[in-house]
């Protein structure tokens, strides 16, 4: 390779490594930007699943997006380091005697990069130059860190989904009790403590959504646990208490719940491709984006306690 090609390869490789590290840091430890690579990959996966026939496609969007993002990080890092190694091939490396010949191509540099990033360390090729002897262990540390960070990210997603599904199920129960012809229904307004509990749990879900945006793309097929399907009813509960409550405490806590719902809708509009408008319009667009089933109030009334 010519000196100019060596410089270009090293510069592109360093840029790719920087982009990957910045995206990993922004995704795991900060709030990823709207146009970051990971957000683009996740959004594209969600859009693609929307166009796939069948009801199971959206349910796979979140897990597939997670795998694609982690794979893209590993690929960008491997290619970036390979471009850094390429100008040093083969003089900067020691090759095992069993090899047919010293590799000089980009494929050989990529092979060494992948082996180093995954910390496999076959031992057939080893860095000989001083700078390379520092760079290779550094890549191994990054590979180990990427694996650990990815596992931690995955384990952090499940508590978020569990809190969201628990809140959705509680709202669903309130909705079904109100629509049950046999049950006298909940008191109107609800006790102030119920509004306070719903507010605190919705705030936690909103913070979870901001901290882990990928959880937005985890779709729930079961309408009992789908928060997008019941947010409209939660808004109805809060508005009804504000209009008709004679209790000062219930009126106050219902107002807090309305503010929390407004903030939740604003977070969705600001971070995801959801139609802007009134809070109710945003919640309807949120439900439509997740293709959730009909709310309980649209179902035929039950005649007994059967499920």
Image (spheres, rainbow, N blue to C red):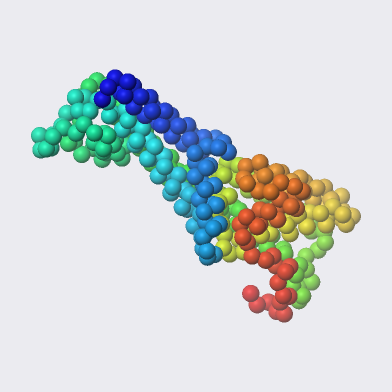
Q: Is residue 262 left or right of residue 248?
A: left
**Position of residue 307 measured from the top left corner of the image (x, y, whole percent):** 63, 74
Residue located at (42% from left, 28% from top): 15
Relative height, residue 243 to residue 108 (above, below) = below
Q: Is residue 134 visible?
A: no
Q: Quadrant of the N terminus?
A: top left
Residue located at (53% from left, 42% from top): 39
Q: Single out the residue that lies furthest toward the right.
A: 246
Q: Quadrant of residue 191?
A: bottom right
Relative height, residue 15 to residue 147 (above, below) = above
Q: Is residue 228 left or right of residue 70?
A: right
**Position of residue 167 measured from the top left corner of the image (x, y, whole percent):** 64, 56
Q: Is residue 199 left or right of residue 106?
A: right
**Position of residue 304 measured from the top left corner of the image (x, y, whole percent):** 70, 79
Q: Single out the residue that lies furthest toward the bottom.
A: 303
Q: Is residue 223 left or right of residue 239?
A: left
Residue located at (31% from left, 33% from top): 82
**Position of residue 94 measured from the top left corner of the image (x, y, whole percent):** 17, 28
Residue located at (11% from left, 37% from top): 100
- Of residues 11 and 253, the one nearer the viewer is 11
Relative height, residue 236 to residue 259 (above, below) = below
């Amino acid at each position: 390779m010519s000196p100019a090609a060596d410089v270009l390869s090293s510069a592109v490789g360093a840029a790719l490594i920087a982009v990957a590290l910045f995206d990993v840091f922004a995704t795991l430890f900060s709030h990823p930007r709207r146009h970051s690579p990971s957000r683009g990959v996740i959004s594209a996966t969600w859009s693609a699943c929307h166009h796939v026939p069948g009801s199971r496609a959206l349910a796979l969007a979140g897990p597939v997006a997670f795998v694609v993002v982690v794979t893209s990080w590993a690929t960008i890092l491997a290619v970036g380091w390979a471009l850094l190694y390429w100008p040093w091939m083969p003089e900067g490396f020691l090759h095992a005697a069993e090899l047919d010949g010293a590799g000089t191509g980009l494929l050989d540099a990529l092979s060494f990069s992948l082996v180093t990033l995954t910390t496999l360390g076959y031992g057939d090729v080893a860095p000989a130059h001083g700078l390379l002897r520092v760079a290779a262990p550094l890549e191994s540390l990054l590979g180990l860190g990427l694996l650990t960070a990815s596992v931690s990210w995955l384990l952090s997603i499940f508590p978020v989904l569990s809190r969201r599904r628990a809140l959705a199920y509680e709202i669903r129960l309130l909705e079904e009790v109100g629509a049950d012809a046999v049950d006298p229904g909940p008191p109107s307004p609800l006790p102030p403590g119920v509004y306070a509990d719903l507010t605190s749990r919705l705030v936690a879900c909103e913070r979870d959504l901001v901290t882990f945006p990928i959880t937005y793309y985890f779709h729930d097929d079961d309408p009992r646990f789908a928060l997008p399907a019941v947010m409209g009813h939660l808004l109805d509960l809060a508005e009804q208490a504000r209009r008709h409550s004679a209790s000062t405490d219930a009126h106050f806590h219902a107002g807090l719940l309305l503010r929390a719902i407004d903030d939740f809708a604003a977070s969705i509009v600001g971070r995801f491709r959801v139609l802007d408008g009134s809070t109710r319009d945003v919640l309807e667009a949120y439900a439509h984006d997740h293709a959730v089933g009909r709310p309980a109030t649209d179902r035929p009334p039950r005649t007994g306690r059967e499920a």
